[in-house]
Image (spheres, coloured by chain):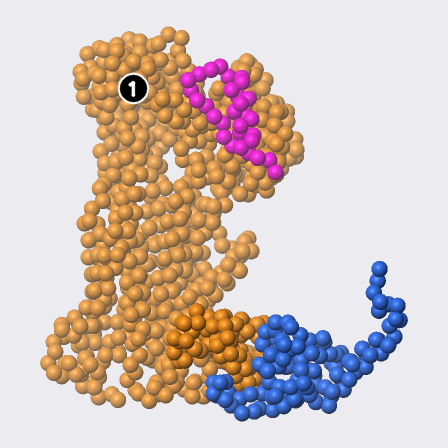
Chain colours: A blue, B orange
Amino acid sequence: MKGTYLGEFEEIVLLTVGVLYDEAYGPSIKKEVEERTGRKVNLSAIHATLNRLDEKGFLSSRLGEATAKRGGKRKKYFAVTKLGVKALEEAKNLRESLWVSIPKIALQGGE
Amino acid sequence: MYYYKSMEDPKDIHPPKFAQRFLQWFCSDAYLESVEGDLYEEFLDNAEEKGLRKAQRIYIKTVFLSFRLYQIRKPQNKTFITMAMLLNYFKIAYRSLLKHKSYSIINVFGLSFGIACFLIISLYIKDELAFDKLHLEHEYIYRVTETLVNEKGEKHQPSVAFQASQRLLTEFPEVQRGITLFNNGRTLASNPDNQYSTYLELNYTTPAFFEIFDFKLLSGDRQNLLKKPQAIVLDEKTAIQLFGSTDVVGKTVHSDRTKHPYKVTGVMENFPKNSHLQLNSLISFATLEEERFFKEFAPVDWTSNYFASYVLLNRNANSTHVEEGLNSLAQANREASSLKRSYHLQPLDDIHFGSAHYENDYSFNPNDINYMYIMQVAGVLILLIAAFNYMNLATARSMARSKEIGIRKVAGAFRSSIVIQFLVESILMTSICVFVASGIVNLVLPYFNYFTGKEISINPIEHIWVIPSLFLLTLVMGIISGLYPAVFLSRFQAATVLKSAGNKVNANMGLRRVLVTFQFVVSIILSVATLVTYLQMQYIDKKDLGFNKELMLVADINSGVVRRDFQTLKNEYAKIPGVKSVSVSSRVPGEWKRIPKTLLTNEVQTKEQGNEMFFLGVDEDFVSTFDVKLQSGMNFEGNTNDSTRVLINEIAAKLLGISNAEGQLVKMHYSNFGGNIDQFDEPLEVTVVGIVKDFHYRSLHEDIAPLVLAYRNNPIHSIDYFTMQINGSNIARTLDSIEEVLQSVDPQHIFEFHFLDEQLALFYESDERRSLIFTVSASISVAIACLGLIALVSFSTRQKQKEIGIRKVHGASVWSITYMLSKEFFVLILIALLISAPLAWYGMGNWLNTFAYHISMSPLYILATGLFMMILTLLSVGFQSLKAANKNPVDTLRSE
């Protein structure tokens, strides 16, 4: 199914949301992703991905408290839905089954 | 860095406003709050970590990246306009048009005339720019020209020597095709039955003519038109003149210049008006090649300028390279001379606007590109005036419509939909005006074409570009004139507008003043231009040229018979009751053909430093017929001795150091016919017997140059014209008698004549054309500006009705109220005058300098124009104000 396909960056964001449990909102997700992967990510990319995951039904969101640091704006917290968990599991299983199927010799590297 | 950071006031730490606003604009409400919050939070972190600047840069980047990702798009239903709404806008626009009739009429009138004027100017310029572009490969066609330089200056020739023209074809691989064109004067031609006859220009050209140029043929085989000797191609007009039909291929044309008749091999369409070549027939070059003089002359000719030459280069060829090659080839074949000569390839596309400096050009109506720019600017300015007028009136009327806008807003209209409503209105208005303007243009074009000698049309069936360009014009004009009022009107706050009956919307006064001033600046400049060109034309018309030009009939001598028998004709002409006196001469003042020159020397003016002088061959009656004044000495006596005598003009006398004509000997060394110098074996020795006062035998654009008047019987130039001073009464009968006399000597001769004053006027034809365009543009711009004023004043008086009423009740006089209402406009005109004066002064001064003889620019012209504008303002403003001031205050104050 095309709609449930999980891209690489999407997978990372989705996993991060899970990692941050209850504390997952834009900037915290960005910081976590940057720390874990060592890449530079623009906030807009995080937003875009969160949106896409939301549309696909992998994420749910709730509005949180407003703080002065946010100019009086409320936070939007994300959590992984059941569907999201299923998608993550599928991705993990796919990888594992692939890992298992690789002959040992191939993992020793070429040359 | 850190120091600065700590100094920053926390209030200063905020993301860039515009980026924030941009975010708010595109981000949908569902996401906006959290996204804004996230961005702000990150911004604060960044500001602390990396500094304010960097944080702001990151913020902007993030906002724009978010936009690019289109993830949080706002639903665009805010400005969504349905068809039904659009139709409603049209309906409202239509109703408001009808409701305010006087306003609509002023608007339609002003805009339509402005657009019509712009259209005509643009069509004229488009046509001028399209000169010579009808040929498919016009970009690759070049004319070969020559520049001759000696101590006395430069000369430019649009034609070259035969060998130059010929070798281009054989020795340059870049030259794809080339033609040679030779003009050998003209002759009387007739059909075999002698039924019809006409003059043929003898233009010989090579077969490739119809391969390079795409002139259209009516009949004949394009490939084989000009291959055989004696072949001739006629244009439509000449074919009809000779045969009364265009179906004439295979028929023969006879002339007194050739032993064998010409055989018609094709008929072409008349040369289009926007071609620099204007020929009535073409004869095969092979005809010329059979002639003895050509056989002897052509193989060695590296120096003449008899042969016009056009080449079609290969697409990737470099014309400079060909030029250089041709010049070195010519140098190798020419004898050394002090004259520096160089050939150039002039692109066909440049001929029309780049040929003013050529002597005796074949070009038809060369023009100056600068005038095109001036005219285009004038056209655009008029269009702007018309658009500004609309803007002005629409904003002035904001009062009347503020309620409508208020109600629309209350009913839930967005600002954008009100902007669109007013744009629809102005586009509707301009489309009506463009329609009316096209009608006006259609009506005016025949007269315009007649006056400018053009064939312009805007028939959409002939020209597909007409419809889209009119459409584009409508759209652009609609937006230019409608955008400001739309933005201005849509700004009204519903609450304010609806609350107060007397609105205080005059924030637009500043802009309105600028627009009115601009209109008057343009109007004043155009009016000064009109006035100055008119006065200069009057000056030319009235200027004493030093000879009589009124009622002078000039008849051409076109055949050897007439030239030989001229004395008989002269005697017969003199007997006609309407003819006062008759003279024969080689050229007449004001004749549009080249006047030959000669080098005249004596002890003072030696050959080394001698000046070339223009040459006229005249008879003993020239002085009396033309009423030229003798300054000293005597006239010719009418005997054979006269051949060794000459008259000179004052400037020539000064150059030769002669103050009193007492039989000084002078020598003539050669005849120079448009660059072709014919050196005499022995210098011709003649005696100066008289000095004539300077007269303007050339255009007033040029200074009077030294002139020699030799006797008609001279080796330089034989007689070509009879000039008769005639009576003003019964000119028709006089003309008949003259023709009768001519027919008795040469029955085949066609009587060709013109009047000298008309011929002289040809010098100033293009000046006259420009003058007309200035006059029309100025009248239209002044009319539009005044209409605008009238409307503005009528609005502002309506707005001030109460004030006027109250002032009157308190005893103000009618005059003081009129003054109060109109003083503002006088101030504006004064400002306009100050702005336009230097511009007009500079521009018109430059134009006048193109005349060697001209009126001098005077501040009076600008003052007079200013005064004229003041009077017009007084009339348009004063009348309205007076009407308002005269109203009974009871009527104006009672209404509420």
Residue segment shown in magenta: B316-345
Q: Can residue B579 be seen in this view?
A: no
Magenta span contains residue B815:
no
Q: Where is residue B146 in the image (x, y as percent from the top left)?
A: 47, 27
**Mark 1 Cα shell of 10 Å, populated few (<14), some (14-19), many (≥20):** many
Q: Nearer the viewer, residue B172 or B825?
A: B172
* B132 in relation to B86, above or below: above
Is residue B452 left or right of B896 when viewed as pictured?
A: right
- Could you tell me which residue is drawn at 36 percent across and 45 percent down? B769
Q: Is residue B824 visible?
A: yes
> Could you tell whether B12 is left or right of B295 in the image?
left
Residue B319 in magenta stretch = yes
Which of these two is toward me, B173 or B557?
A: B173
Q: Residue B450: where, in percent of width, then height?
A: 41, 46
Q: Quadrant of the C terminus of chain A?
A: bottom right
Q: Give the residue at mark 1.
A: B708
Chain letter for the residue marked with disc 1 in the picture? B
